[in-house]
Image (cartoon, rainbow, N blue to C red):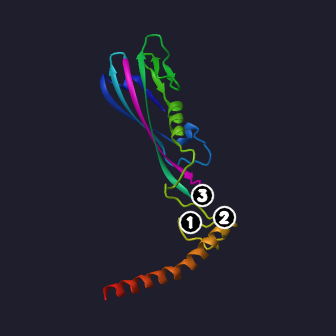
Amino acid sequence: MFFDIDSVKEGVSSIVLREPPENFELAYRDCKFPNEVVANLTILRHERKLIVGVKVTSDVIMTCVRCLREFHYNLESLFDFGIELVDGASENVSLWEEDFISVAPHNGIVDITRRVRDALLLEIPMKPLCSSECKGICPTCGVNLNIEECRCKKQELDSPFAILKTLLERKEKDAAPETETLKHKDKKKKNSLET
């Protein structure tokens, strides 16, 4: 992905660069880049100095780590750098880690391929999710819980506190008739006081 310094006029100008993803060596995990990479450059030129702002966009197909379904994700990254036009400097300069480069004032070409590649790869999430509400898959039967309900039997695990749960349930069951009896006695007492 290159742009020619001679094509940049004094003041503010814009350049749109488009290239196929194969030119960027974007092989990363299970990611596929189905569409071209687009770089929108906004350039401010004042005499022999240029400030370049770059917005890189592309579309990537990834696999969700929860439900294992492929989904589209829009990548967008911003970076900027400075250029100084210097007599005797190299005509072909590759921008990578530098934030400021020197280029020959005539016939100077700047290659931003590696910087664009790094910017895109840094935007790929480490754990891609198709949605923040993704329910994933059932670990037992493997059904996608976003699409359908799991038909597996819910199995209660034996917990060391399971005996306490049964004791509490028994206590609540035994206490229920007592509370009814107390309410009935209070009602009788209230009625006898009124008469």
Mark 2 or 3, nearer chain start: 3
Tag of residue 161: 2
The one of 6 and 35 positioned closer to us in this rendering: 35
Amino acid type of disc 3? Leu
Q: Quadrant of the C terminus?
A: bottom left
138 or 147, nearer to the observer: 138
Check the image and report above or below for 179 versus 33.
below
Q: Quadrant of residue 7?
A: top left
The amino acid sitting under disc 1 is Leu
The numbered mark, 3 or 1, whose residue comes first in the sequence reads 3
> Between marks 2 and 3, how big is the CA–CA gap?
35 Å
Q: Report the magenta residues as a range.
A: 49-66
| Residue 93 vs residue 126, the one in the foreground | 126
The percent position of residue 47, horizontal first and vertical second, equals 33, 16
Amino acid type at circle 2 is Phe
Q: Work out whether mark 1 precedes mark 2 in sequence or the reverse, and give the earlier one.
A: 1
C-alpha span from label 3 to label 1: 11 Å
User: Which secondary structure, mark 1?
Assistant: loop
Determine whether 110 is above or below 163 in the image.
Answer: above
Cβ–Cβ under 8 Å for marks 2 and 3: no
Crowdedness near tag 2: few (<14), some (14–19) or many (≥20) residues, C-alpha within 10 Å: few
Across and down, in percent, residue 166 comes to 64, 72
Secondary element type, mark 3: loop
Per the image, label 2 sits on a secondary structure element best described as loop
| Residue 9 located left or right of residue 28 | left
Q: Which mark is residue 145?
A: 1
Residue 68's disc is 3
Task: State the predominant SS element of the stretch in magenta.
Answer: strand
Q: Whole-percent x and y of residue 92?
A: 50, 21
Closer to the observer: label 2 or label 3?
2
Residue at figure coordinates x 63%, y 72% from the top left: 167
